[in-house]
Amino acid sequence: MSRLLVSLRSVTPEDAAHLAEVWGDVIRRAGPEDQVADMEAVIAMVLDSDDQRIVVAEYDGEFAGAVHLERTTMSALNLEPVVRALSPHVLVAHRRRGVGTALMEAAVAWAEELGIAHVATAAVAGSRDANRFMARIALGPYAVLRVATTHAVRGRLSAHRRPAAAGGRQLTQVLAARRSLRRSRAGAEG
C-alpha cells in the first residue's frame, strides 16, 4: 500500500537544498550555503549530461530521497559497462516505506534501457542498514574504497619507511640470529 505513495522524478535545480540534506554525510564538509552551491553545480552537470541522472523520490508529495545514476565502466581497468547508483539515500522520516527500493528500481530500469548487464552501488561503510539493504537486493562487495587525507597517508608512509641500519643489525634480527645459533648448537650436541 505504501508503494503507491512513492513517486519518482528527475532532479530539478530547486532540489539542491533537499539533496544537500539527504546527502549531507557524503558531500563536502562545508557550511550549508556551500553544500547547496555544490549540489546546484552537480545538478547543472547532470542536467547537461547524457551519462548521468539524479532520480528524486517523493513520498506522498514530500521529498524523501535521491540517487545519482551514472553510465560508466566497472573501473578504469575493467571496461565492462555498468550503471553506478551512487548514494541512494532516504531521509530518516521516510525509511521502510519502499523509497530505497524504488530508487534502486530506477537504476535497474535505466540499466535495462541502456542494455547494460550490471548495476553497482556504494554504501557508506558505517551504515549497517544501507549495507544490509544492498545485500538483500543481491548487490555483493566488489571492491573496498578507502579514503584518508593526503597528510595522513604521507605521515603513515613516512612511518613505514625502514630506518637505515645504524652501524649494525636491528634488535629483532640479532635475536633471530641468536635463536638460530642456539638451535644449531643443540642439534649438533644432541
Image: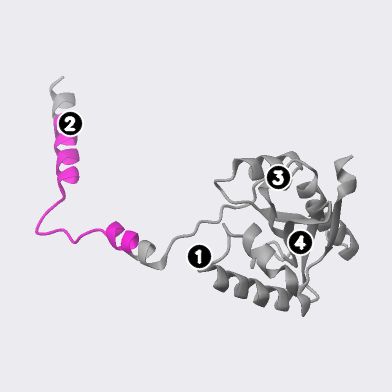
- Residue located at (19% from left, 35% from top): 180
**First to last magenta residue range:** 155-183
The relative height of residue 15 versus residue 25 in the rendered view (above or below) is below
The relative height of residue 141 versus residue 56 in the rendered view (above or below) is above
| Residue 176 is one of the magenta-drawn residues | yes
- Mark 2 vs mark 4, foreground winner is 4
- Residue located at (82% from left, 50% from top): 102
| Label 3 vs 2, first from the N-terminus | 3
Looking at the picture, tell me which residue is in the foreground, 145 or 65.
Answer: 65
The relative height of residue 144 versus residue 177 in the rendered view (above or below) is below
What residue did someone put label 1 on?
29
| Label 4 vs 3, first from the N-terminus | 4
What residue did someone put label 3 on?
134
| Quarter residue 130 falls in | top right
What residue did someone put label 2 on?
184
- Mark 3 vs mark 1, foreground winner is 1
Q: CA distance from mark 3 to mark 1?
A: 25 Å
| Residue 110 is one of the magenta-drawn residues | no
Q: Which quadrant does the N terminus fall into? A: top right
Q: Secondary structure at mark 4?
A: strand
| Label 3 vs 1, first from the N-terminus | 1
Q: Residue type at mark 4: give it.
A: Val
What residue did someone put label 4 on?
82
Q: CA distance from mark 1 to mark 4?
A: 29 Å
Q: Residue type at mark 2: give it.
A: Ser
Left or right, 4 with reference to 130 = right
The relative height of residue 108 versus residue 133 in the rendered view (above or below) is below
- Mark 4 vs mark 3, foreground winner is 3
